[in-house]
Amino acid sequence: MLWILRLVLCSLLTPTRADPGALLRLGMDVLNQVQNAMDESHILEKMAAEAGQKRPGMKPIKGITDLKVKDVLLPVITMNFMPGVGVFQCVSTGMTITGKSFMGGNMEIIVVLNITATNRLLQDEETGLPMFKSEGCEVILVSVKTNLPSNMLPKVVNKFLDSTLHKVLPGLMCPAIDAVLVYVNKKWASLNAPMPVGQMGTVQYVLTSVPTTTPSYIQVDFSPVVQQQKGNTVQLADDAGGAEFPEDYAEGSSQLLLSAAFLTAELALLQKSFDVKVKDTMIGELPPQTTVTLAGFIPKVAEAYPKPKPLVTQIRINKPPKVTMKTGKSLLHLHGTLEMFAARRRGKPPVSLFVLETHFNLKIQYSVHEDRLQMTTSLDRLLSMSRRSSSIGPFKEKKLIGFITDFLQEAYIPVISDVLQVGFPLPDLLDMNYNLAELDITENTLVLNLKLD
């Protein structure tokens, strides 16, 4: 990970809320811990290697020939947020410049310097992706040591060094900042690319606006696009309440916020996979799934089927799944029908016994695996159950509550958990590692508190 992130999180402007959707807040905790992009991309070493090469339009330096640069020190980078403007950066480094001096001998100059610049964020008109550009690059000399003869007049030496270094260093070092920004910009290349959710559709993180810089963090607002495989876009509900960053997180820390409305839209991609037909007679610890067991709750089944018949259960979800969140708890609401059949001899279709309208909740537990948000579920409550139709005559639905509840827990929930293992993609942002994130459930919001290695 990156000092890249430091540069990347540069000058971000005008705040706009992407509500509901996804919000990313990047604080100084990230900036202070990331590795050095200059070291990762070896930009300074490349610039040093090119220093002595003649380039078109480059004028020779008076008083020095055979210019070479060596022993480039590992840069130390410090960053400061500039609210409404961007990020001010200072790169501290050092190097040795060698060559032949105007005296005719070998010259060696050891310099320690600071490179300062402001990075400003623009937006590529063709791709819509952020792109960074440095402004006001300056090179400030901290110290200079030389092997020039001590008997030379100090004023002559200082004038020569001042003239030489001010000609050499800006042309050598400032392009390094620009080169790092090019390197950083490539890290954004996949940010708004559609990412698959199995074979069901895609999720695309689209920037709502140019990100915002404040005194404590950089905020990136997304308006995610959830699209089914056939090309239809799933609209995010706007009645779920505003998603907000919790106030009790440490200033300068970093979080990714996913709204309940966004997760609801993603789960809509999986709705058809939530329709399940169960034909197994033996399921976990449940009693045998036959008409004999069902007759213990509905005596009329025994009259209709004196001989045991295997049961077939069909669950269909006829409304889009919905996610709700309260502090510490998240639920998946499922509305649908449960139809139970009596199986017949091979080749003959099963006979419908009854159809129940059902509404039940599943508890959701969230986790992160690599760059995907995953969910596991358990039954919370069977909220309502009413008879829509029955071929065996009227019966009291309440007598079936325990039987249906156990069936959902043992037979249906495992299927849903398998479906959810596909996971939902998280923003492909600068090689961000989400594996160490700590997850919190708040009002209408899932918050990933981001940590670095």
Image (tube, helix red, strand yellow):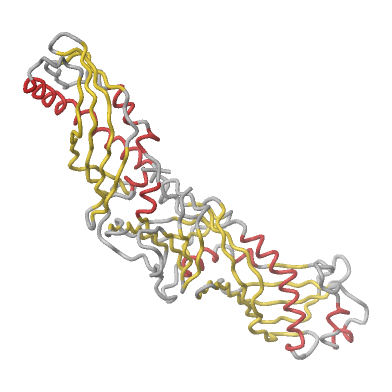
Q: What residue occupies the far top of the structure in this picture?
A: 104
Residue 13, image quadrant: bottom left
The residue depicted at 32 percent of the width and 49 percent of the height is: 130
Q: What residue occupies the far right of the structure in this picture?
A: 307
The residue depicted at 26 percent of the width and 18 percent of the height is: 68
Rendering coords of residue 57 (x, y %): 16, 22
Residue 2, image quadrant: top left
Relative horizontal placement of residue 105, taking residue 428 as reference (left or right)? left
- Depth order, front residue of 221/89: 89
- Depth order, front residue of 212/339: 212
- Depth order, front residue of 65/350: 65
The residue depicted at 46 percent of the width and 54 percent of the height is: 451
Q: Quadrant of the N terminus?
A: top left
Rendering coords of residue 419 (x, y %): 64, 60
- Relative to 59, say whether 267 is above or below: below
Relative horizontal placement of residue 90, taking residue 399 as reference (left or right)? left
Residue 204, image quadrant: bottom left
Relative horizontal placement of residue 218, taking residue 147 as reference (left or right)? right
Please count the marks in the image: 0
Rendering coords of residue 274 (x, y %): 64, 67
Rendering coords of residue 55 (x, y %): 22, 20
